[in-house]
Each structure stands twice: as structure tokens, then as C-alpha cells.
């Protein structure tokens, strides 16, 4: 088991060993030994550590100047002697040499196995393959934990970070263990607990340190703790308690790096953004791409760098990035950090000019040149043909930069101008520019999606598809928008299956897809769309995004009404009322009026009149004239008769109707298994 320092490798190994023993898999017992990472004996004292070359930092948890920083843990020979004595051998029977001890240790373990008493060996905190190999028995089972991915012929389990919900549960469990059930801060402040889990990045060590700090101060609110962690410059200082600290955990891994690896680790911070390519890292470090790739792979084996969403892209955990930034500032002079930034700026400007030139080419020529760049045999020809050519020479003079506002699934904002909706259609958005600007945004997003598809960037392609689909929806081209947003949902699901998912982005893509159907087919709502809204609701629940939940409640009201007001009228009313109540609790007056409008369309005449009147009053107070006109028009067209069963277009059985009505309730109960009970084919609105 390999992973970042503080990821919980030792805890998982201990729990697995106890469970295996309880199940009777290892009647001979469990042998556990701490190999002490890099903290016991010098590795190669003849080689100066990069920290010694560049000086240190005397703050707690940072580099010292002792000259003894680089370590490689317990010596295999000494560990073998301890293990043999633990198995009952007298000290005089333990041979002096490491190889003799290794052979004897393997023989003893084999003898136990032949007697039907196999032993599980747990080697915790290994620092290198050289340290581990002499300890491996010829037969039997071994659990190894290390901050590095070790080449010892073992099955590798990379330990990732906790999911947001699991991190919150760990915080609550640790507080209950320390203070008992009387501590209810996590239950009282779920939003603050979720913020703390996010600021800890799901790192178990960070969450446990926060729990220890909160346990030491039982009256400290979780919101105060979250606010203390929000400041990036001091977050690592906050994540320290007594002899434990996140910075100290990262320090052990950092000190193990070679000088070139450590320099790359520091200079990666010169590049902005959540991830970077091998090419950008090479430019920052002033190295050729292949040597840069090898350095990045070494950092990945040390779990200080993670692979990004596509091959050749890299990212760091948020807390690791903060630590890398500290080290970068400490060594800014020797590393020439400002020169790295200048190189990156020049490189990005050059690439932007080249991208502009490529985008200006006819489609067929652009594809040929893109293919030539990717194929090794043709790459040399392409470079020779383009050598010396200004990549920006095809571009006209650059116009002033303008900010393009990307439509989102978060709904309209007060005071903005909006197109008038049709009754029952999805709510229009306020943050939509004029149609001319939308046409330009559509073209931009199409190019963005094409570039990402050619580059194999799944995440970028999914994000571009969401933006394109939303632009198409704003232009009321619902069938095409539905196809593009379905592509976005599919791509985000693929990324989730690869462990690279973004639940917030997938949730928004699902909601946008549902809004597209509600706008394109206001006369009905397929089961597929209700399922998408409920899947988004599950994500909003796990993310504790209450505003998103309220928006989904409002759209569920419209979806059930559109499906069949006679069959699903009670569900439409229930979700409309919940949306109104939650927006009121959140203090969102504008969206409360929107929810009242949706409720007015779903309710019986008396409640409909009250809801629409209250919505109109709120819009008048907000000065939202267009919304006032819309609500007045809906009030004048109000129903006087209840909906009839004959108007139903769903053509569904009683069993399906009950399942559809209960699905969002099941999601809020945490019964996500209901989402997988049926296979629902995709639909289109064309």
C-alpha cells in the first residue's frame, strides 16, 4: 500500500491485519514491524542532501541544519534479528549476517505454514525496495506500506484521499471518541464540517488533527475552525497539534528526494492552475521534456505528484501544493523562480499564437497538421516545414479582450433582463448575453471541444460540452443542446470511473440536461430526466450544497407537473413547497419568488393564486419588471378546473408511478440503490 504521507496507510494495514486474524486466515498470528521510513539511519552519508546544499528553515516542521536530514529507516539485518527473536529463537541462535538471517527467517515462516499456522507479516513505513527485499519470505503473505511505490513484485494499492462524506464522518467519529456522544458540533454545523473536509483535501491526517484541535477546545464552533483554515498562507500552520503536523509529514517525503527532483517539485508551483502538462513542467524547470517526464514520474512514485485527467498531465494535492509553495519561496533565489515564470509566460504566449494560427486554418488542413504533430514519423517533417515561421503570422491584429460570461445551472440573478418564458417551460437564465454574443460563445465552445477531443483531454472536452450545451439551450436549440449535454454527462461518468471525477461538474451537467428537456418538451417529462435530476440531487446531498438542492426541488416541481399534473400533482406540490421553504431558509428572495411561480403553476386554484400573488409582490419589491409581467400573465390565465387523468401523456403503470414519485425521497433518505433499480434508455427532444 503506497500513498501520500498522512493518507492512513498504517491504519488501514492494522485494520486489515486484525480482520484477517479474526477470520482465521492466519492461525499463526501477525508479525508487525515498523521500518521507520527515513527516520533512523543515514542512507548515503557520502551524498549531500538537497536540503543541505540549499540551506534550511528553522521553523517547526521544516528543514533543520543538522546534516542528518536524509534517512532510510531501520536496517534489514537488525529488523530480521528482532523478527527472529519475536518468533521465539534464542539470541545466540540468530546468525550475524543479513543473508543468513533472511534464509533462517524464511525457513521458520515456511515451517509455520507447513504446520497449518501461516503468519501474516506487516512491514510498515518502508523507505525503499532495498530495505524490503531481504525481509520477504519465500512463501506466505506480506502487507507493506510505504510513501513510495516500491518494485518488489507485489500487488500495488495506491491509497487515495477520503471522499467528502467519508472525511466528515471521520471528523464526527474522532470527536465522539474523544468527547462522547455529547459533542454534536458536526450534526449542528454540517456545512462547516463539509468546508473543513474540503480544506483538508480529504487527507486523514489533516482531518484527525482538526478533530484533536476541536476536542481540545469543546466550545470552538466548526465555522470558526473552517475560517481559520481558509487562509492558504497559514493553513499548514493551523494543521499541527503537539507532535503531529501535515507539514512534517510532507517533509519526510521531500527530504528523500534527489536535488533535481526537489527542484522540479518547487518549480512546478510557478505554473498556475489545478494541473500542468509535462511540457509546461519542462519549461518551468528549464529541462528537455524527456528528462522532465522522468523527474515527474519519480515525484509520482513518491506520491508528491498525482497523474491528471490525461496522459502527460500532472497535479498535486492542495495541501502538498501549499507545502511546495513554501519550499519554492525558501529557495526562490537558487532556483531562479522569477526566470521560470518568465519562461512560462513566453511559452504560453507562443503557444497561444500558434493555437490562433491553427484555428484559423480550414478544417481539412487543420486536421492534417494536427495529425502531423502527433505522428512521430511526420513530426520531424512538420517541424522542419514550420521552423522559422512566426506561429502568429496568420492572425489579424488582436481585438481588445472581452469577458465572455458562461451560462451556468445556478439560475438567474435579480435585476437582469430575461426572455419571457412559456408557462410550464424551464426557467430562463439571467446571465445570458444577447444572441449575437451567444453565437460567438457557441463558436468558441465548439472550437474548445474540438481541441480537447483532438488532444485526448476528457475533462476539458466534458467542460466544453457543458458550456456549449448551455449556450445552445440559451439559443433555444434544445435538441442539439440535449445531445451535447448527454455527451458531457457521459464523459464525466467515464472520468468518475477512472477515479478522476468531479461530482459538482457532473451534478451541474445533469441539471442542465434536465432543464434542456423541460424547456424543449414542456408537455411531458421522460423518466430519464427525472432520474437525472435525482442523480444530481444525490450529489448535492453529498456535497451539502443546499442551494443546488433547492434549485433541484424547484425543477422537480416543474418536471412532475409537466409529466402529468393529474398523476403526479401531489409530488409537484410537495417539491414546489420544499423549494419555497428552503430558498426562504437560505435567504434567497429572488429564487423563492421563482419557486413560488413554479408552485403556482402546479397548485390548485386557491393556492396557485396565493403563490403567484406572493411571487409578484416579491418581484415588485426587487424591481424585476419583466418577472412581474410574466407572473401577471400567468395569473390572468389561471386554471379553474382540476387536471384530468385523461390528459396524462406518461402512459405508466401504478408501479412505475409510485417508483417515480418516491425516487427523490429515496435519494434524500440515502437509498442511492434506487437509482440503479432500472435501466432507462436515453431520450431526445427532437
Image: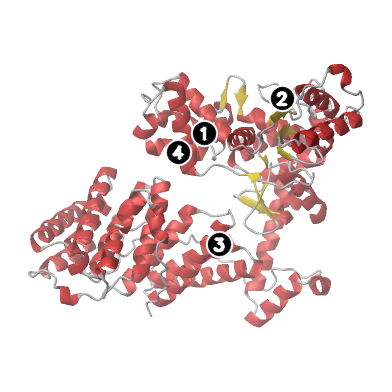
Ranked by sequence position, the earlier of labels 1 and 2 is 2
Q: Tell whether label 2 touches label 1 (CB within 8 Å).
A: no
Name the mark nearer the viewer: 3 or 2. 3
Real-space Cα separation, disc 4 to disc 1, in angstroms: 13 Å
Residue at image coords 75%, 29%: 35
Ranked by sequence position, the earlier of labels 3 and 2 is 2
Q: Which mark is residue 195?
A: 4
Quadrant of res 674: bottom left
**What is the crowding at mark 1: few (fewer than 14 residues within 10 Å), some, or many (at least 20)?**
few
Real-space Cα separation, disc 4 to disc 2, in angstroms: 31 Å
Image location of residue 459, percent across then percent down: 57, 60
Residue at image coords 88%, 17%: 92
Real-space Cα separation, disc 3 to disc 2, in angstroms: 44 Å
Residue that mark 3 sits on: 494
Ranked by sequence position, the earlier of labels 4 and 2 is 2
**What is the crowding at mark 3: few (fewer than 14 residues within 10 Å), some, or many (at least 20)?**
some
Amino acid at each position: 500500500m503506497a500513498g501520500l504521507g498522512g493518507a492512513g496507510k498504517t491504519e488501514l494495514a492494522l485494520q486489515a491485519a486484525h480482520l484477517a486474524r479474526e477470520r482465521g486466515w492466519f492461525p499463526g498470528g501477525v508479525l508487525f514491524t515498523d521500518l521507520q521510513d527515513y527516520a533512523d539511519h543515514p542512507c548515503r552519508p557520502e551524498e549531500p542532501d538537497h536540503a543541505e546544499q540549499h540551506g534550511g528553515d528553522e521553523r517547526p516542521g521544516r528543514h533543520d541544519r543538522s546534516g542528518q536530514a536524509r534517512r532510510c529507516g531501520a536496517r534489514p539485518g537488525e529488523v530480521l534479528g528482532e523478527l527472529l527473536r519475536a518468533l521465539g529463537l534464542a539470541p545466540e541462535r540468530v546468525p550475524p549476517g543479513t543473508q543468513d538471517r533472511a534464509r533462517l527467517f524464511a525457513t521458520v515462516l515456511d515451517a509455520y505454514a507447513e504446520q497449518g499456522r501461516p503468519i501474516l507479516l506487516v512491514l510498515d513505513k518502508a523507505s525503499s525496495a532495498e530495505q524490503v527485499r531481504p525481509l520477504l519470505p519465500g512463501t506466505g503473505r506480506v502487507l507493506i506500506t510505504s510513501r513510495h511505490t516500491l518494485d518488489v513484485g507485489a500487488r500495488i494499492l495506491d491509497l487515495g484521499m477520503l471522499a467528502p462524506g467519508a472525511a466528515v464522518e471521520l471528523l464526527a467519529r474522532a470527536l465522539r471518541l474523544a468527547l462522547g456522544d455529547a459533542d454534536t458540533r458536526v450534526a449542528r454545523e454540517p456545512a462547516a464540517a463539509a468546508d473543513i473536509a474540503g480544506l483538508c483535501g480529504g487527507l486523514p491526517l489533516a482531518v484527525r488533527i482538526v478533530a484533536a484541535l476541536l476536542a481540545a477546545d469543546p466550545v470552538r464552533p466548526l465555522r470558526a475552525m473552517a475560517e481559520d483554515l481558509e487562509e492558504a498562507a497559514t493553513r499548514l500552520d493551523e494543521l499541527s497539534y503537539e507532535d503531529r503536523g501535515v507539514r512534517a509529514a510532507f517533509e519526510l517525503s521531500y527530504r528523500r528526494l534527489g536535488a533535481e527532483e526537489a527542484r522540479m517539485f518547487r518549480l512546478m508551483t510557478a505554473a498556475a492552475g489545478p494541473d500542468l502538462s509535462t511540457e509546461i513542467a519542462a519549461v518551468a524547470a528549464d529541462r528537455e521534456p524527456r528528462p522532465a517526464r522522468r523527474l515527474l514520474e519519480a515525484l509520482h512514485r513518491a506520491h508528491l505528484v498525482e497523474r491528471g485527467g490525461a496522459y502527460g498531465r500532472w497535479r498535486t494535492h492542495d495541501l502538498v501544493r501549499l507545502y511546495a509553495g513554501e519550499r519554492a519561496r525558501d529557495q526562490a533565489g537558487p532556483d531562479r523562480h522569477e526566470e521560470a515564470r518568465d519562461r512560462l509566460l513566453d511559452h504560453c504566449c507562443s503557444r497561444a499564437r500558434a493555437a490562433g494560427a491553427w484555428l484559423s486554418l480550414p478544417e481539412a488542413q487543420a486536421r492534417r497538421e494536427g495529425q502531423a504533430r502527433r505522428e512521430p514519423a511526420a513530426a520531424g517533417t512538420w517541424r522542419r516545414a514550420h521552423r522559422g515561421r512566426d506561429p502568429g503570422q496568420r492572425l489579424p491584429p488582436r481585438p481588445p479582450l472581452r469577458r465572455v460570461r458562461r451560462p451556468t445551472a445556478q439560475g438567474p440573478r435579480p435585476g437582469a433582463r430575461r426572455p419571457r418564458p412559456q408557462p410550464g417551460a424551464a426557467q430562463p437564465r439571467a446571465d445570458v448575453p444577447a444572441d449575437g454574443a451567444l453565437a460567438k460563445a457557441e463558436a468558441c465552445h465548439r472550437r474548445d471541444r474540438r481541441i480537447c477531443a483532438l488532444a485526448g483531454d476528457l475533462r476539458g472536452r466534458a467542460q466544453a460540452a457543458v458550456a456549449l450545451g448551455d449556450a445552445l439551450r440559451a439559443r433555444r436549440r434544445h435538441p442539439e443542446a440535449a445531445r451535447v449535454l448527454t455527451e458531457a454527462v457521459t464523459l464525466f461518468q467515464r472520468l468518475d470511473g477512472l477515479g478522476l471525477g468531479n461530482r459538482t461538474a457532473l451534478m451541474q451537467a445533469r441539471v442542465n440536461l434536465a432543464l434542456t428537456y423541460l424547456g424543449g418538451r414542456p408537455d411531458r417529462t421522460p423518466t430519464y430526466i427525472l432520474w437525472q435530476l435525482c442523480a444530481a440531487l444525490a450529489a448535492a446531498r453529498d456535497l451539502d450544497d443546499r442551494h443546488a438542492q433547492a434549485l433541484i426541488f424547484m425543477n422537480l416541481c416543474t418536471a412532475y407537473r409537466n409529466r402529468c399534473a393529474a398523476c403526479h400533482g401531489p409530488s409537484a406540490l410537495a417539491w414546489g413547497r420544499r423549494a419555497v421553504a428552503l430558498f426562504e431558509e437560505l435567504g434567497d428572495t429572488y429564487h423563492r419568488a421563482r419557486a413560488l411561480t413554479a408552485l403556482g403553476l402546479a397548485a390548485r386554484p386557491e393556492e396557485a393564486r396565493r403563490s403567484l400573488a406572493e411571487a409578484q409582490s416579491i418581484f415588485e419589491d426587487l424591481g424585476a419588471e419583466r418577472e412581474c409581467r410574466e407572473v401577471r400573465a400567468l395569473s390572468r390565465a389561471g386554471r379553474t378546473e382540476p387536471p384530468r387523468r385523461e390528459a396524462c401523456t406518461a402512459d405508466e403503470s401504478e408501479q412505475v408511478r409510485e417508483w417515480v414519485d418516491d425516487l427523490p425521497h429515496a435519494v434524500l433518505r440515502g437509498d442511492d440503490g434506487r437509482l440503479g433499480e432500472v435501466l432507462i434508455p436515453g431520450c431526445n427532444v427532437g
